[in-house]
Amino acid sequence: MSRRYIYLSCILSASLTCALGQTQYAYEVVSIKPVDVSLQQIHPVVSPEKLLLENTTFASLILMAYDLRVPAQMQNVPNWAMTSLYTIQATADEQTSTAAKALSSEERRRIVQTELRSLLAERCHLQVTSTNRQLPVYLLTIAKGGPKLKPTPEENPALGRSPSSSPAAQGSHAMIGFGKMDVTNGTMAMFVSQLSVMRETDGRMVIDKTGLTGHYDWQLRWSWDPIHDPGQPSLFTALQEQLGLKLDPDKAPIDVVVINHLERPTEN
């Protein structure tokens, strides 16, 4: 589930029917079916206008709907919700689609969360309790010697940015693979989100304690598989040697969603 969520979270608090302003949002037409392995793979889409997911779990939907970063933030999740795979397609009504086009990326993200919560409530009768628990985490801090991140230049042809536009006004670009991360115009908030869902952090949320508030470019290389790739350092060592950052184990109060009720969805 975590690998699927890494991707979904890059392309995407607490009443089930929360509203943005005075408007209630919900997908108008929803189709939910078990995965058909004979069908061609589809490219996932997560937007206010359209939802298109394949090989996804309902646990992943809950993660997105409640803006959770790691599975440990969900408790009492039924086993089927973590293992059963579905193809989910949904479209919004014309009014929502038209209104969403004029909104900021943050407002669009909030609409998607509202739509997903409505879908989960209607099709799975989801009931949750939002609370706070003390959980193991990693703190991202600055290593001895200081950070080695490169500030994103004001003028960056790779992002189509002119000298008059600031990094904060432009989107980030990330390429993440097995033991490889190349980021342009990234922030520490973005970085800890990526680190939180990596295998090496073992399901712990990573919390930013660097104090770095700018936009940066960085490259990171580490060993995805120490047995077959012994020439690269571990993620923890690579962070210190290549970026001047480190991960310190700790505990911290974390927002948690407790699943009180969740039914298998009816198919259509």
Image (cartoon, rainbow, N blue to C red):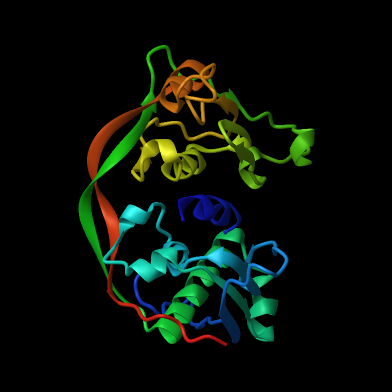
| Residue 96 percent location from the top left of the image | 63, 80
Q: Would you place residue 268 above or below residue 226 in this image?
A: below
Q: Would you place residue 74 above or below residue 121 in this image?
A: above
| Residue 131 percent location from the top left of the image | 23, 63
Quick one: 151 or 138, which is closer to the camera?
A: 138
Quick one: 217 or 99, which is closer to the camera?
A: 217
Number of marks in picture: 0
Q: Is residue 212 left or right of residue 206?
A: right
Res. 99 visible in picture: yes
Q: Is residue 263 left or right of residue 43?
A: left
- In the picture, residue 16 is in which quadrant? bottom left
Q: Residue at left 48%, top 80%?
A: 119
| Residue 200 percent location from the top left of the image | 41, 35
Q: Residue at left 49%, top 69%?
A: 113
Q: Is residue 7 left or right of residue 74?
A: right
Q: Residue at left 56%, top 64%?
A: 55
**Farthest-out residue, left:** 134
Quick one: 162 or 215, which is closer to the camera?
A: 215
| Residue 102 percent location from the top left of the image | 68, 69
Q: Residue at left 48%, top 66%?
A: 57
- In the picture, residue 162 is in which quadrant? top right
**Farthest-out residue, front:** 38
Image quadrant occupied by the C terminus: bottom right
Res. 20 visible in picture: no
**Farthest-out residue, top:** 145
